[in-house]
């Protein structure tokens, strides 16, 4: 789980467009002091949306009408939004390194191991990035807010770990999956039982095969199946 104290860096170094807009309009005075404690940029965006809705009931000074009323009066004067929203992301074309990672703006993100050595396209947004292999989406990540950080998805390494299951226990991707709540205590208990029954190598390989099921089944269903096994 991301430390709540790091939100100061998120707001000051990599604010979302909505957060930046609110800061310019004076919203930072009302809502960003003290710095809000959130776990992710998505949660910060949800807070900003809630503040915007609350502001519709606010009155500026002694004006008789609310902000929502004033906007409703002006809305008919605005031009309609385009049918397709403009692309606001920035494209990069990094090459996947031997660790199945790409580097975007000094940060490292994992991609599926089958892409090692290949060049991919990355569309970077304020709060997330999307990795493309040709026209196919290969990976999605929440954008890292600071510099020199690494975000790994355990699922990207499963095919490689099937060949070398001994690498799983010390894998950084596993540590991050635990921290994010994707690798649960139920997974841990089932893994321990599988290793006890089949040995370290075969028990770990059996766990990796179970983790592959998350690609096709809802997370909660797989966890429930493990708990009942």
Image: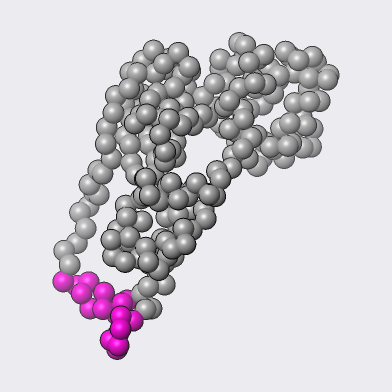
Residue 20 visible in the displayed image = yes
Q: Is residue 88 left or right of residue 96?
A: left
Residue 76 falls inside the magenta stretch: yes
Q: State the residue at coordinates (40%, 23%).
A: 102
**Position of residue 138 measured from the top left corner of the image (x, y, whole percent):** 41, 27
Q: Is residue 190 left or right of residue 5?
A: right
Q: How many marks?
A: 0
Based on the displayed image, in which of its 4 quarters is residue 177 positioned?
top right
**Position of residue 170 measured from the top left corner of the image (x, y, whole percent):** 64, 21
Choose between 122 and 171: the one closer to the eye. Answer: 171
Residue 223, compared with residue 86, is above or below; it is above
**Position of residue 72 measured from the top left corner of the image (x, y, whole percent):** 26, 76
Q: Which residues are magenta?
A: 59-77
Q: State the residue at coordinates (37%, 34%).
A: 130
Q: State the residue at coordinates (59%, 42%).
A: 1
Based on the displayed image, in which of its 4 quarters is residue 185 positioned?
top right
Residue 42 visible in the displayed image = no
Residue 64 falls inside the magenta stretch: yes
Based on the displayed image, in which of its 4 quarters is residue 203 positioned?
top right
Q: Is residue 74 left or right of residue 107?
A: left
């Amino acid at each position: 789980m991301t430390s709540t104290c790091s939100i100061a860096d998120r707001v000051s170094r990599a604010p979302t467009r909505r957060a930046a807009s609110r800061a310019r309009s004076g919203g930072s005075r009302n809502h960003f002091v003290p710095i809000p404690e959130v776990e992710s940029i998505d949660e910060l965006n949800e807070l900003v949306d809630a503040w915007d809705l609350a502001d519709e009931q606010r009155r500026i000074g002694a004006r008789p009408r609310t902000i929502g009323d004033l906007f409703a009066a002006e809305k008919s004067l605005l031009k309609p939004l385009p049918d397709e929203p403009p692309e606001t992301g920035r494209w990069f074309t990094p090459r996947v390194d031997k660790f199945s990672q790409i580097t975007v703006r000094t940060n490292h993100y994992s991609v599926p191991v089958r892409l090692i050595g290949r060049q991919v396209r990355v569309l970077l947004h304020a709060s997330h990035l999307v990795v493309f292999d040709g026209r196919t989406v290969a990976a999605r990540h929440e954008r890292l807010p600071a510099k020199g950080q690494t975000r790994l998805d355990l699922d990207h390494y499963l095919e490689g770990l099937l060949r070398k299951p001994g690498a799983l226990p010390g894998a950084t991707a596993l540590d991050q999956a635990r921290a994010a709540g994707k690798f649960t205590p139920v997974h841990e208990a089932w893994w321990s039982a599988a290793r006890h029954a089949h040995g370290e190598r075969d028990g770990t390989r059996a766990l990796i095969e179970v983790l592959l099921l998350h690609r096709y089944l809802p997370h909660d269903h797989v966890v429930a199946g493990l708990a009942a096994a």
